[in-house]
Image: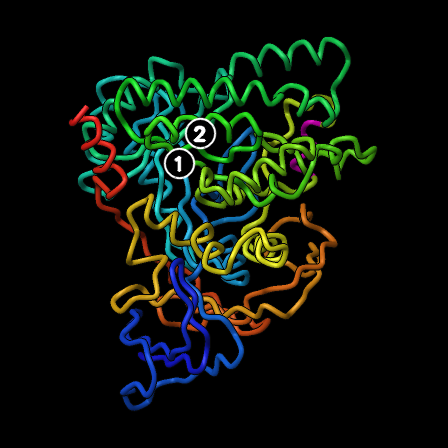
Amino acid sequence: MSLLIRGGTLIDAARSLRADVLCVDGKIAALGADLDVPAGTESVDAGDLLVMPGGIDPHTHMQLPFMGTVASDDFYSGTAAGLAGGTTSIIDFVIPNPQQPLLAAFNEWRGWAEKAASDYAFHVAVTWWDESVHRDMGTLAHEHGVASFKHFMAYKNAIMADDEILVNSFRRALELGALPTVHAENGELVFQLQKELIAKGITGPEGHPLSRPPAVEAEAVNRAIRLAEVIGVPLYIVHNSARQSVEAIARARGEGQRVFGEVLAGHLLIDDSVYQDPDFTRAAAHVMSPPFRPKEHQDALWKGLQAGHLHTTATDHCCFCAPQKAAGRNDFTKIPNGCGGIEDRMSVLWHYGVNSGRLTPSEFVAVTSTNAARIFNLYPRKGALEVGADADLVLWDANATRTISAKTHHQNVDFNVFEGRVVKGLARRTISAGKLTWNDGDLRAERGAGRYLSRPLNGPYFEANSKRHALA
């Protein structure tokens, strides 16, 4: 099967040029003008559109069992919605229950993901520790291409990793050449603050941000960074939401430490006033961790993204509908944590990033695709406009507008945190593995078309970090 994209302006993380793109058997076969095209090739006229690598969302939770329920978007509906917004790959999370073997959890998630409409990889969470976890990490890395492991520093009495687990797992990741990632919130502080607030009668969604103030995140970010420094392993910190987190990452990088930061589209745009909404359903729909912050933090996050202290943009896509959120109507600690966003990430980042002058188009490609591919060892298969790369592309209309709404989105959730925002810049067409999967409003996602992405170990960032420590 072959597809020719004619006449667009190609934009990747480093350049912009006018060229055609020939896709053959799911790969980019040629770039340039007057290409030699096989007979029977389907043609798409890019016209005035921009042709960019498909988006990579490095932080999603499809079909996640969590807090007594299951996320409403499964691997098909969630990845299909991503295709409608220009995202062609995700990295989801395998999260074992305490004492559950990592391999058993991984096999369970692989089964759920067989219905995915776009390509996917997995981070695997380390939620407990013994010799079997040490062994399973090796099997996952060497036999299944898992090149990153997740650690929740929050959620006490559930999946929280204490310092002993962090040290053991970070050391094992170093041995394997895998990248440790952390959800950085001090779980003990959150637990204690939650109890205090409930005792004071603060039971509504407004209690959620009060139980997770910026300092709770900042402490965990600093602790994870210093543990990684002592062990000598690179570190990736997910969903940074606070100014103090950006400052800690910038400080560590200034000292030569290999630390990477992720920011969510929602944290860049939404502030904590949403938790004061008198309507429980609307307020609860915004409950996620870390919570949305006061506006001053949004400015710091944008500056961190512009300065290169934050490297990737994600969604933490984890949808729960109103009846699910209602489990915490009388106790905010029981509201399932999570919001959507996979369909809208690219558009809101273009509108508020590129259109505002905060990001160039090439920087947009870097933070929505290429940087994630590089950090998580998918580059140049993903995140690149190069011969031999996967034919995952988005044809972007920088001048088109749309109004974001739960009434029209493809995400399987009854609320949209970006509801009512008018954004300029959207995916006209999305191509996944050389196939047209979104065509100007026509979603052609195919159940089960997504492929599991096995990733190599010892990526370039890891090797650079290891060499620096060896020379020290």
Magenta stretch?
A: 323-328
Q: Relative to 191, say whether 259 is above or below.
A: below
Find disc 2 in the rendering and name its residue.
249
Q: Quadrant of residue 213?
A: top right
Q: CA distance from mark 1 to mark 2?
A: 7 Å
Is label 1 in contact with label 2 (beta carbons under 8 Å)? yes
Above or below 26: residue 271 = above
Residue at 32% x, 44% y is 376
Does residue 91 belong to the magenta stretch?
A: no
Mark 2 residue element: helix
What is the tally of numbered marks visible in this picture? 2
Residue 238 as seen in the image, left or right of residue 230: right
What is the crowding at mark 1: few (fewer than 14 residues within 10 Å), some, or many (at least 20)? many
- The residue identified by callout 1 is 260
In magenta stretch: residue 324: yes
**Which type of secondary structure does the marked residue at label 1 adopt?**
strand
Name the chief secondary structure element in magenta.
helix
- In x, y percent, where is residue 324? 65, 36
Where residue 239 appears, as percent x and y from the top left, is: 51, 35
* CA neighbours of label 2 inside 10 A, class few (<14), some (14 to 19), many (20+): many
Q: Is residue 197 above or below residue 23?
A: above
Q: Nearer the viewer, residue 344 or 17?
A: 17
Give the quarter of the figure containing the N terminus: bottom left
Residue 98 occupies quadrant: top left
Q: Residue at x 41, y 39 (%)?
A: 93
The amino acid beneath tag 1 is Phe
Residue extending furthest toward the bottom: 39
Q: What's the residue type where badge 2 is placed?
A: Ile
- Tell me which numbered mark, 1 or 2, is placed earlier along the sequence: 2
Can you give x and y, in whole percent of width and height, for residue 343 in the image? Answer: 56, 55
